[in-house]
Image (cartoon, grey):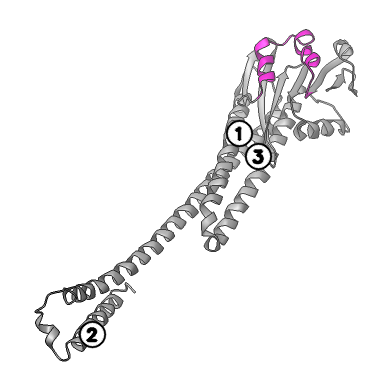
Amino acid sequence: MIKTMAVFKDGTIAFDVSIEELNSERIDWVWVDFENPKTEEIDLLRTKFHFDEIAIKHCVSYKERPKMDYYEGYRFIVLQSLNENMEQTEIDLFLSHKYIVSFCWDATSVLQIVWNKVKGLKSIKGLKPEQILYHICDEIADKFFPIVQKIEDDIEDIDELGTNSDLNMIDGIKTQVSKLSKVRKTVKPTKDLIYRILNSTHVEIDKETTKKLRIVYDHLVKLLDDISDNREMANDIRESYISTNSHKMNKTMKMLTSVSIVFMPLTFIVGVYGMNFIHIPELQLKYGYYYCWAIMLIIVIGLVMWFKKKDWF
C-alpha cells in the first residue's frame, strides 16, 4: 500500500495524491509512505524516484543496522523500532529537501502515529521533510522507554520474590538481561545515527529541528544509562543469589561433615570389637557391653558440644 502527502508552495496540504501528480510544479515537497508494498509498488522506487539499486536492495532485504548512507541528491537512512513484544521493525527513509520516502514491510505504529500527527496539524508553516524525520526518530525513542521500564519492574519483582522462588530466579534474571541486551543493540546504533545526522554537513536541518533532535539524542543517552544500571542491578541480584546459595551449601556441608566426624570413632570401635577373633580380652568383661556404650556416648556428647561451640551445628 502506498500513501502520499503533498505540501504545496501556497502553504496548503493534500493527502492521497496520485503518483502521477507528485511532479507538479505547484508542489513544494512530498511524503510517500510504502507500507508492506507489492512488487509493482517496489518498482516505483526505481522507475519513479530513481533511487540507487543498493539502497533499494537494503529496503527489500530487511533487518539492516541503523545507519545513514549518502547518495547524490538524497540520503538513505535506516531506523529500527521495537514494540512491547520486543519485535524489531525496520523503517527505511529516503530524504531530500524535496521529499521523504518511507519504506516498511510491517504496519508499524510509528509511521502511522507521525502520519496522523501531521494530518492533525492546524498549521503546516515551515513543515519540511527533516521535521518528519525528527518526528519519526522521536516516536521510535518514546517507544523504547516503556520497554526498559517494564524490564526494570520485572527485575525488581524477581528481587522481591527471589527468596520464595529460587529455582526460577536465575532463569528469570537471564531472560531480563537478554531483553536488555536486545534493547541496547537497537538503542545504541540509533543514538549513534542521530549523532551523525546532527553533525553531518550533508544533511541540512534548521536550527529548531536540530534542537529537537538533540533532545531525542539526550533521551537515548539517558536510556542507555538506564539499561546499564538495570544490567548491573540484574547482575547484582544474580551474584547475591549465587553467594547466598553457596553459603547455604557450605552450612549443609559443615553439618554433614560434623555428622560424619561424630560417627567415625563409633564406627572404629564397633569395627574393632566386631572382628571374628576368638581371644579379645574386653569381650570377657562382665560389663564390657555397657562400658562400650558409655564410651561411645561420651565421645558423641563431647564431639557435639565441641561442634556447637564452633557453630557447626
Horizontal placement of 162 versus 96: left or right?
A: left
Q: Residue 111 placed where, x, y %?
A: 77, 30
Q: Which of 230 and 182 is in front in this view?
A: 182
Tell me the element at label 1: helix
Residue 98 within the magenta-colored segment of the rendering:
no
Q: Name the residue under label 3.
A: 86
Circle 3 sits in a helix, a strand or a loop, which is it? loop
Query: How far is the residue under mark 3 from the one under mark 1?
Result: 10 Å
Answer with mark 1 or mark 2, whichever residue precedes in sequence.
1
Q: Where is residue 114 in the image (x, y as percent from the top left)?
A: 79, 32
Residue extending furthest toward the bottom: 286
Q: Is residue 42 magenta?
A: yes
Residue 56, above or below 106: above
> Dividing the picture into quarters, in which one does residue 284 lie?
bottom left
Q: Which mark is residue 186?
A: 1
88 shown above or below 21: below
Query: Quarter of the image holding residue 207?
Result: top right
Residue 257 locus on image (x, y percent):
30, 67
